[in-house]
Every structure is written in C-alpha cells, then in structure tokens.
Amino acid sequence: MTPQHTPYERFRANLATAMDLLDLAPAERKSLEEPKNIHRKAIDVAMDDGTKRTFDAFRVQYNDARGPYKGGIRFHPLADEDEVKALAALMAIKTAVAGIPMGGAKGGVQCNPKELSRKELEAVSRAYIRAFADHVGEDIDVPAPDVNTTPQVMAWMRDEYEKAKRTYAPAMITGKPMAYGGSVGRDTATARGGFFILDEYVRSQGLKPEKLRVAIQGFGNAGATMAAFLHEAGYTVAAVSDSKGGIFRERGIDPKRVAEIKAQTGSVAGETDGGRAVTNEELLELPCDILIPAALDNVINGGNAGNIRARTVLELANGPTTPEADAVLEGKGVTVIPDVLANAGGVTVSYFEWCQGRSGEQWTADEVDTKLRRTMLESFRAVREEAAKRKISHRMAAFVVGVGRIVETMKARGWM
C-alpha cells in the first residue's frame, strides 16, 4: 500500500478538499491535520496455558472541540496506528455531521479474538482499559464496540474502569448490555439510521419503495437488520451475501427466511428458492437500484466501479468506496450516501446511551427511535442542502458540514 493510499492519507485528501471549499487559513488547517493525542501501550496478558503474551494497543484521540472524544475499540490482528488514526478522524466528522456534542476517537488491540478463550478475551479487555484508564471517562473519552468487540467486552471494560478508579461510571463506555447500563435500540441503530436516510432520499426523488430493488453485501448485524427494515417497508431485497457467498432472486427474498438459513447452515448461500448463487464480487455488479455495502472496506474500487449498475449506493460499512471509485461513480451520475452520514445511527444511539448513563434515566424504545429519526433526517438534510448549494458530492458535502461545525466550535473556544 503506497503512502497516499493509506486510510489516513485518504482522509487527509478529503479533509484538504473540504478545507479548500471552506477557505480555511493555514493555521486553521494545521489544527485539523493530525490527531490531538496518540496513546500507545503494550499490554501483557496471562494466557490459559500459563504463558504471558504482549499485545500492541492504541487509543487515538483526534478532536474534542465539540465534546468528549467518542469512538469504538476494535480487536483485530491488522489493527494498526494508521487505520486507527483514520477511523478516529472520521468519527470526529461523523459526530459533527450528526450534530451530537462529541468528538472523535478510536481504539484497537492487535489480536485475533477468534484464537482467544473467553477467559483470555476478558483478560485482554480488562488489560486494555487499565492501560488507558487515565485517558478515558465520561467527560474525557467514551469508547464503544467496534470490530470483534461486543456488549460483554464493554461490560468487562466498565467494571475494570470502576475498580481502577473506585467509582460508579455508567456513562464511561457505551454499547453495554441492557442489564449493565445499555440502551434499547443500540443493536439495530446503525441499520435504523441508514434506513431513515435512504427512505427520505427515495421519497425526495419521487420514487416508490415497492418499485426499487436492493442488493446488500454483508449479512451481519447491520446488513441483516437493514434487509429486514427494507423488506417491511416494501422494498424488494433482491440479493444478500455474507463472507461465504450470496444469493440473488430478482423477484425478491425474505430476509427472515435467509436469516433462518444462515442460522442453520452458517451462511446465506444455501437454499436459493428459485434464485441463483452469487459471489460477493458479483453482487456488487448486479442489476439493482440501490446497492448497500455493509461489510468490508474498499470493496467498490477502481477495478469494478465502472460495472456498478445501481443508481444509489448507501454505505453502511466504513470506507467501502475508494477515492478512485468515487470519481468513477460520480462521473456516471451515481449518488453515494457516504459512511460518515449513512452509518451514523450507531454513534447517535451511543450518544443517547451516554445521556441516559449521566442522567440515570432509561428511555423507551419509542423515545430512542423518535430521537434517532429526527437526528438522522436533520443531518441528511444539512448534507443534501450543502451538496446542492456547492454542486458537490454527498461525501464532500458531509465533510464540509462536519469540518465547518468543528471549526466553528474551535473558534468559539479560542482554539484557533
């Protein structure tokens, strides 16, 4: 991977364009080009066989002008500083676009949780929070789940933090189990927020859901939940896939039935019921109206963007479209609703959980859903208006909105 194609360099390229459009001064630009803090630790963990292993761990804090840092923690063997830096920066843009009073951060541990026992996973989780306990907290930096981390991991981390600090801290971390300070709606929030935006966009274009076909790459939590929401709203979900392959059925599939097949066989690529099996690569190029990448990054790239037949791409995954693909899709007139807008439902409901933890309240499902819908639609309308005014893509409009809001707050605080 050449330097200009690292995740952080990609972020810097979009940031630079947004700063040009906002006509920022050199000093203002400099304050946004690098994270505020990069914390690195080597954490030692006792393994089940009596040995000790050392894992590299990170917490990158990009910007906290608008409020405490906010961002997930991922456990992955390829998690490195550059990736975590990029995700922290994008989280700052995402919280600003969503209009919530938080900043952007991200964390990671270089480990493969699939190779760890439950006891070892708990030990890694507790060691991580001990290592960074002085850098997190409800008024400083509020972590959350990310790749390969779960509500249980968040519960272990909260418990370890409370032990280390000898305090009660329900708002120091989000994505927790309901029994330990979690929020209703958190498990479906990413898909729910994306659904609100997509449905608003479809109706703003004068289109009818029942006449639109959707292909979803990724049938994990976000993809499967999105498929269910769309099916219930009358859209035709024509194709879905997971890591082992997918199915395409032109007249539509029932996401509930597909979920049952996956539960039985371990993959959606089982019974096609009159459809046909497709690979993940083939799914991206199927004849459909809406394409939703909901799994991996960089799946829409310079090699396949010219073959994309969808007219709308909604990014539920983080970074599924490369800059080269963006240029191709824009040239073809394809509307890309970017990740920093489309998948912000997760961090929005994390913010709601933080609010509930601080106040001691427990909101109802209807309250969460109503507040999420309002937040997502206000964000989308701000981005759509910016895109129309400046005649730029939705991605660049989201960056302009997000960067503009961060800069406005930094100026108000006297930081620039």
Image: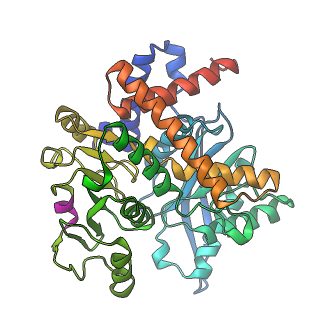
| Left or right of residue 318, residue 88 in this image | right
In-front residue for pair 298/229: 229
Q: Kindly identify the residue that appears in the image at 54 percent across and 66 percent down.
A: 149
| Left or right of residue 146, residue 370 in this image | right
Q: Kindly identify the residue that appears in the image at 79 percent across and 56 percent down.
A: 361
Image quadrant in which the C terminus is located: top right
In-front residue for pair 333/40: 333
In-front residue for pair 66/39: 66
In this view, 79 is above or below 262: above
Q: Can you give x and y, in whole percent of width and height, for residue 252 in the image? A: 24, 67
Residue 57 visible somewhere in the drawing: yes
Q: Can you give x and y, in whole percent of width and height, for residue 167 in the image? A: 86, 59
> Which picture quadrant has residue 51?
bottom right
Q: Can you give x and y, in whole percent of width and height, for residue 223 in the image? A: 39, 62
Residue 59 visible somewhere in the drawing: no
Q: Kindly identify the residue that appears in the image at 44 percent across and 21 percent down.
A: 19
> Which picture quadrant has residue 102?
top right
Q: Kindly identify the residue that appears in the image at 65 percent across and 32 percent down.
A: 66
Does residue 91 belong to the magenta stretch? no
In this view, 225 is above or below 387: below
Residue at the outermost left position: 307
Q: Which residues are magenta?
A: 279-283
Q: Main secondary structure of the magenta part?
A: helix
What colouring does the structure picture have?
A: rainbow
Q: Can you give x and y, in whole percent of width and height, for residue 305 in the image? A: 18, 45
Residue at the outermost right position: 166
